[in-house]
Image (tube, grey):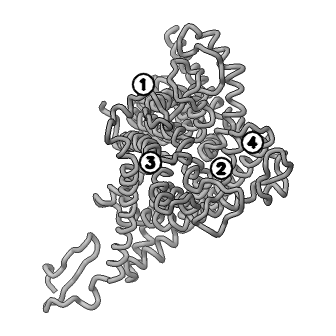
Amino acid sequence: MSRYLLRRATNAAVTGLCIFALLLALVPLVSVLWLVISHGISGLSWSFFTALPSPVGEPGGGIGNAIVGTLYIVGLACLIGLPFGIGAGVFLAERGDGPFGQTVRFIAEVLSGVPSIVIGVVAYGLVVLPMRRFSALAGAVALAILMMPGLARTTEELVRLVPSTLREASLALGVPQWKTSLRVVLKTALGGILTGVLLAVSRAAGETAPLLFTSLNNQYWNASRPDQPTAALTVQIYNYAISPYEDWHRKAWAAALVLLMMVGLLNFTSRLLARSRLQA
Amino acid sequence: MRKADLLVDQGDMIRERTANGRPNFFTRVNVGDRTYALLLTALGGAVLIVAGLIVFVLWQSAHTALATHPLEFIKGMDWDPVRHSFGALAFIYGTLVTSALSIIVAVPVALGLAIFLVEIAPSGMRPLVSFPLELLAGIPSVVYGLWGLFVMVPWLRERLEPFLGAVFGFLPLFQGPPLGLGYLAGGLILAVMILPTIASVSIEVLKKVPVSLKEGSLALGATRWEMVRTASLPYSRAGIMGAIILGLGRALGETMAVTMVIGNSPEIHASLFSPGYSLPSVIANEFAEATDATHTGALAALALILFGVTVLLNSIARLLVRAVGRGPARA
């Protein structure tokens, strides 16, 4: 009987430990979110979103150029990365069952684990060195390479979700395969692909490491010239955080709140899209 | 039309020819299909081209630093760009120590969480926990760095490190002044960041354990924990290994958060309290300012090392996770 009690006790103890692990995992999440909101909210003002950064000690100043810069770099990255990422995903779903497709899938999986800083070094060699200057384009190339593998994998999964009966119905009506793929399969999967795109964009907007030595930074506005250094929200947070000034630390928290809101909004939208698709 | 006139082409495309050998007007291969297939294959091939490009560019920028004395480069202790002296050991050590620490801290928590979620919690609770996990994974690393620098580091300096020093001070690991910034801070922030990766992959893997196995175990009188220990865990061992290696790969390459809390000093210390440096951190700190080719080359060589190690780890991890769907691990 005592042996039975021991086993019951072990079971209860492990269950308790598992619940403890769950609570422990939530501590940093709650702490990060709470502190970013509570520290950041006091620094937010209209001019914080619209003004250029001010020198130390000078009141006011904002991160307008960094917000615009992030949008610009990520936008350029989408122009370069989305066609390839989505295209590769469609390839994997539609024709990816052979050995070539298997190879592409495996390489995409492995590439998605390559550290972003390494991709930054690649973009430096690929764009910054030949152009002899830091530029928004270099940052965008780095982000595009980072987006590609993940996007390919999510696109594949979502295209594969389209019921094969739809495809068969279309083919049975005599529609050629390419038209079936584009007009029936991809059209059905479009909402899902959009979800994947939003996730990829939110991840790219949060990247810092590959931008440090590709798009560098800029004290002024730039949203028109891809060959110029450009400020980014994440890089600005980093620079403010490691500075020795109290005032800049406050700005770092406020900028982090802006970044979290941006990333959160993208995530939230993609979730909404995914949910409405599931119900449809 | 004879049966022999049917030529099967690319799986499902059937090409028919009429008796005189000309393509039949109604059943000929669609030009659009051919073009579309070609286009898709090219887009898939682009992934391989990008992978090749990454390897080529890294090798191109790094080979000068590695060509002369690759071993000296890895074993060297001295990193002084001004005197063109490049030894990467302190960075490799820092990366290994922080990553190992993060695995030690994160794995038990992630596994406990995964087991609770899959085996113990009512199924209605799953979305309640998977949502915060996704949230945790979605927070940008620079925000973790900010939190680490202004919240975790002071806590380490004033609370945890004095406590560890007082209790475990006889170990060299926990000696020295509590600075806050250092290996311990780097390892802990990494643990927070890789936790969602390990947990979510483990959850996926644990879900794949056949219900019949678990029911069999319970029917033999096992408690819930005994069921997990004797049925679920052995079945999913390879996949959980994969999840851990995936987390390790992330930890090795994580840059911003570590850079902000590790202290950035290129030295090797036994104590976890002392400041160190990691491979990604030194690239992040010095690459933009590196002016001469030898310095950039040395930093690119560090990136190449990082690339090689993470690609290797990821390949192993993916193969392990994939193996779970096919049955219990024999190893």
In the image, A183 versus A118, the foreground residue is: A118
Please tell me if label 4 and label 1 are on a single chain.
no
Give the labeled residue for mark 4.
A36
- Residue at image x 32%, y 83%? B30
Q: Secondary structure at mark 3?
A: helix
Marks 2/1: CA distance? Answer: 55 Å
Q: Residues within 10 Å of mark 2 (few under 14, many from 20)?
A: many
**Residue lying at 52% horizontally and 20% vertically, measured from the top left:** B269
Residue tagged 2: A234
Discs 3 and 2 lie in a common subunit? no
The residue under label 3 is B293
**Mark 4 vs mark 2: which is more N-terminal?**
4
User: What's the distance in space between the residues labelled 4 and 3, CA to CA?
Assistant: 40 Å
Residue B220, numbered label: 1
Query: Mark 3 or 1 closer to N-term?
Result: 1
Q: In 3D space, how far apart are the residues under numbered discs 3 and 2 (Cα atoms)?
A: 28 Å
Nearer the observer: mark 2 or 1; the answer is: 2
In what element is the residue under mark 4? helix
- In which image quadrant can residue A244 be found? top right
Q: Mark 3 belongs to which subunit?
A: B
- Amino acid type of the residue tagged 3 in the rendering: Ala
